Amino acid sequence: MKSKKLRNRKTDHLELCATKEVGFRQKSTLLEEVQLVHQSLPELSLEELDLSVELLGKRLRAPLIIAAMTGGTRRAGKINSDLALIAESRGYGLGLGSQRPMLQEPSKAASFQVRDQAPTALILGNIGVAQARECPSRTLASLVEQIGADALCVHMNPAMELIQPEGDCDFRGCVDTFARLVSDLSVPVVAKETGSGLSPQSVEKLQRAGVEVVDVSGAGGTSWVGVEALRAQTDESRQLGELLWDWGVPTAVSVVNAVNARMTVIATGGIRTGLDAACALALGAGAVGIARPVLQAYARGGRGSAEAYLVQVQHELEAVMLLCGVRTVAELRRAPRVITGKLLEWLSSE
């Protein structure tokens, strides 16, 4: 029964994210408050730009990650396989959806096993911290090994769990779980939020646990509280989901919070364009991740449409870098910029 409920949830998530309005309604990423300064004399050729970055032991040809979406069903396996082919051909990273189905049904591993399609790409495994808390480290090491992942994302989703019909509302012991996994696993542990971002206090707890890499998944992109509100089975859960639809720390603020703590940062949460990506990288992110827009492009036209969308984002990023007069991502982080509006208010108050 549990496996059927999990399978239905995964199917619901894919369908809602591909077809429904599940973005934040009023709160934005605040990346629009990062004003990059135009350079009329960039003294650069577009051809000489170098977008490559080092991340988690792999070199990406561009600082783009196809962020975690799905797994555990036949359809999810097909999506993961196609996205892996894109990641391999373009030199991007790929994040997989939660491997929780593998804990309940080992046969579900096939929907996550994309190493054959992406032999050299950066592959990120994924498990919830609530599930990780209950599992021996050797079990989680096996999840990593079975899919040939380069790192394990351990996701935090308390806001989502509070609304989810099957949610786990016991959030005790999560910091200790991170500390255990950092100590026990042979691959890096990436602390990943799921749409609500990271406060300075959360970043400090992760640091104390030994975590060095975070995926901020900030507010302003997909509202997973909203997704669960649409799935809610009671009026009470639905009302709570509506109330908390826009809950969270905006992506731009989350990036700065983690960068200030000298963490390696993957910026996800509302990254839609190359300009969004450039602003996140300028704030100090090491790479950016995109999920729902890729899924929506895939729903429209399969692998070709998803790849075309990502190539467009890369071209937009290249254009912005040229207009900022920078040749590399490292130079973009040092480029002149002006912080305005609500982002400045957030950063001034923390």
Image (cartoon, rainbow, N blue to C red):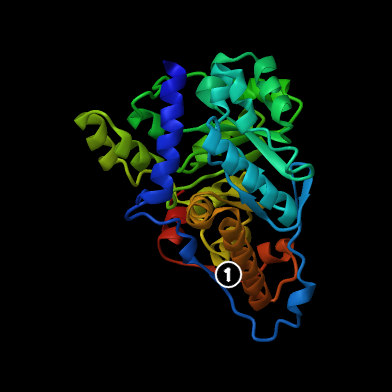
Q: Secondary structure at mark 1?
A: strand
Question: Which quadrant of the view contains residue 206?
Answer: top right
Front one among 346 and 144: 144
Residue 329 location (% of width, % of height): 71, 62
Front one among 347 and 129: 129
**Type of amino acid under label 1:** Arg
Label 1 crowding class (10 Å Cα cut-off): few <14, some 14-19, many 20+? some
Q: Mark 1 — residue? A: 337
Total tally of numbered discs in the picture = 1
Against 82, residue 271 (above or below) is below
Residue 167 location (% of width, % of height): 39, 24
Residue 52 location (% of width, % of height): 76, 58
Against 121, residue 89 (above or below) is below
Left of 116 or right of it: where is 289?
A: left
Residue 101 location (% of width, % of height): 54, 24
Instruction: Name the residue at 57% across, 56% down.
Output: 306
Instruction: Name the residue at 46% across, 67% down.
Output: 340
Front one among 166 and 176: 166
Left of 276 or right of it: where is 89?
A: right
Instruction: Name the residue at 68% across, 65% down.
Output: 332
Residue 203 visible? The answer is no
Left of 100 or right of it: where is 1?
A: left
Front one among 349 and 251: 251
Residue 111 visible? The answer is yes
Left of 313 or right of it: where is 4?
A: left
Question: Which quadrant of the view contains residue 57?
Answer: top right
| Residue at the bottom extreme of this rendering | 40
Q: Quadrant of the N terminus?
A: top left
